[in-house]
Amino acid sequence: MTRSTARAATADQDLEAYGAMIQIRLFEEELQRQFLKGLVHGTVHLCIGQEAVPVGVCSCLRPTDVVAATYRGHGAALAKGVDVAAYAAELLGRSTGTCAGRAGSMNVIEPDVGLIGSFGIVGGSIAAATGAALTLRHRDGVAVAFFGDGATNQAYIHECLNLAQVLRLPVVFVCENNGYGEYTALEQVTAGDLAGRAAAYGTAVAKVDGNDVALVREAARVAVEQARAGDGPTFLECATYRHLGHSRSDPGAYRPAEEVAKWIARDPIPRLRKSLEESGLEREAQRIEEEERERVSAAFDAAVQAPYPEPGEVSEYA
Amino acid sequence: MSELEFRDAIRQAIAEEMKRDDTVVLWGEDVAAAGGVFKATPGLLETFGAARVMDTPISELALAGGAFGAAVTGLRPVIEIMFGDFMALPMDSVINQAAKTWYLSNGRQRAPIVVRSAVGAGGRFGAIHSQNPATWLWNVPGLKIVGPAFPHDARDLLAAAIRDDNPVVFLEHKRLYSIKHRAPTWPRANIGQAQIVREGEDLTVVTWLKGVHDALAAAEQLAAHEISVEVIDVRSLRPLDLETIIASVSRTNRLLLVEEGPALGGWARGVLGAIAEHALESLDDAWVLATAEHPIPYSPPLEDAFLPGAERIASVVLDRAGVAVASSPGTVVERGGVR
């Protein structure tokens, strides 16, 4: 799909997408700072550079639709509507967190907004969303699985593409193809074409520039409408890039500098900002950015002040 | 009162729960049109329709992962992993998704899934159609593990498993599908309650699934030697009813645990450890009869030699009694957890 075939997005849609993307970016940048201060524990996997994919896809969903995210899932969680303050508190392990500090970055669940999980094992989100579609097909609902290119080498994707296609389930498989499975380049460990694998099951396939939120949104709109109409799943491959390494311990040094530079030049957020400015929406964009900066900053300020869970609560809900 | 066949008990429980609650669904390989390879689910497709009773691809990971996604969004899937050995395939979803979501979500997301599976040896199915995966899953908090020995218990425990708001692994021993029994004298089974199925004074035998029937047959033989054996069917490994076992050994002072599976990493040694920890003063003797540390063989004489049947239970008890009589307490070799 090219931009000319995409429906012209309204200014409101673009501004909304900008707000959602900048929220994720600011949230993760602040998360990184909190990590360096020692307030975020264990590890984190940042999606900086990939924000257009979850934002474009989730903008096509209803609150009652369901999303299964990955361990690089901050973008999907925020785009689906997880409360920023509760999410910040969760990642800091506080009692006011989304899961009262029990889940942490890789495992957040927020049933109230349809986030059925963030899955710490590559590919786990795929079956969870496929299963949710088995429920949602009776409720006019749609489920979305987010996963990386690395997950296309797991059994999950092949088993679930087959099952979803055979049952025409209302699920959208969103492959965030950032070119690397953890530390290893995709082409080094992957045969053939990712979308081609889905096509082999008869599944509808779309490949888009995952750093252009309007293109992602348009492709997702088609996929979600098809799913809701009972016409089955779509495999939506979004080409994108993570600006940073796999996790906090990975500087990403295995990636050629020119490759990183090329992708940073295609950063989806400045791209959208530029297009908003060209449309005369600079002031609105700036206002939204400031609002989000304030929201994220307040969220982390509150999280830092929030109490840790009581050790005596450790065995609740066992 | 009429007899109930084990496989009918399974079907009845599913049918009754599907009638009672239209969110209950049954998915698995050959469970619908074929009625299950052990014929435990015939007629359910015809009664409840294809939207609720579904034959799936041979994709255990998608089946279990799909059940997870369906369960957290409002269905109550009963899935069948055809043979217990195949449990190796859906482990990620069962262990890392279903078992953990209730705790990780701080009690906000439930995964009401029942994972049924046919387990156990004795049918000449060979090494990878005869195992019991219970102990692979036993150290996963968040998974209840249930295994009935009698048809009526099977019906009641499966109904309870389906009504449970969190995942239950429900194991059906292949050698029990065709047994028929009248209603037992004991109360309706609940998950997490062991049951004394034969009272005795000299020795407590703790086991489950087919082991219960072997222990009962052994108890009959031992009665002829004036050894009075109490038999406890644990019925569930998690939760584990230690109280019933402790109360029994506090009377009999001797404990034999019979496991159709290897002793290392097995539940029998685990239970023995718990009894030693909590009731060491009640134990004069305690030991485990388990299977050897190698895969399950196919050929009938080999498989028979491998399994702890009634004859072996009776003979190890007689040996042990002989040793115990011949030696003074404290000198017997291999006395697990003895003072």
Image: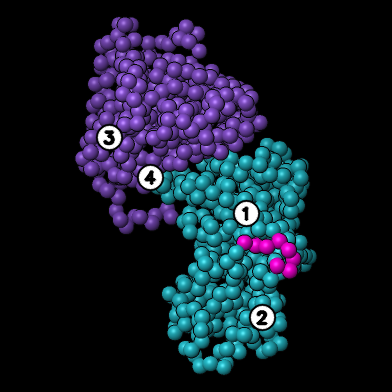
Chain colours: A purple, B cyan
Q: How far apart are marks 4 and 1 (CA)?
A: 31 Å
Circles 3 and 2 in contact, beta carbons < 8 Å = no
Chain part drawn in magenta: B295-302
**In percent of the image, x 34 and y 14: which residue is there?**
A272
Q: In which quarter of the image is residue A131?
A: top right
Camera-side mark, 4 or 1: 1
Q: Label 1: which residue?
A: B85
Q: Label 4: which residue?
A: A103
Kind of residue indicated by mark 4: Ala
Q: How far apart are marks 3 and 2 (CA)?
A: 65 Å
Camera-side mark, 3 or 4: 3
Kind of residue indicated by mark 2: Ala
Q: Are marks 3 and 2 on the same chain?
A: no
Q: Residue A22 in the image: state x and y as whole percent.
A: 31, 23
Q: Distance between the residues labelled 4 and 2?
A: 50 Å
Circles 4 and 1 in contact, beta carbons < 8 Å = no
- The chain under label 1 reads B
Q: In this view, does B322 lie above or below A254?
A: below
Q: Distance between the residues labelled 2 and 1?
A: 29 Å
Secondary structure state at the residue bearing disc 1 = helix
User: Mark on residue B314?
Assistant: 2
Q: Residue A36 in the image: state x and y as whole percent.
A: 23, 38
Left or right: B232 in relation to B216: left
Q: Which of marks 3 and 4 is nearer the N terminus?
A: 3
Q: In this view, does B169 lie above or below A46?
A: below
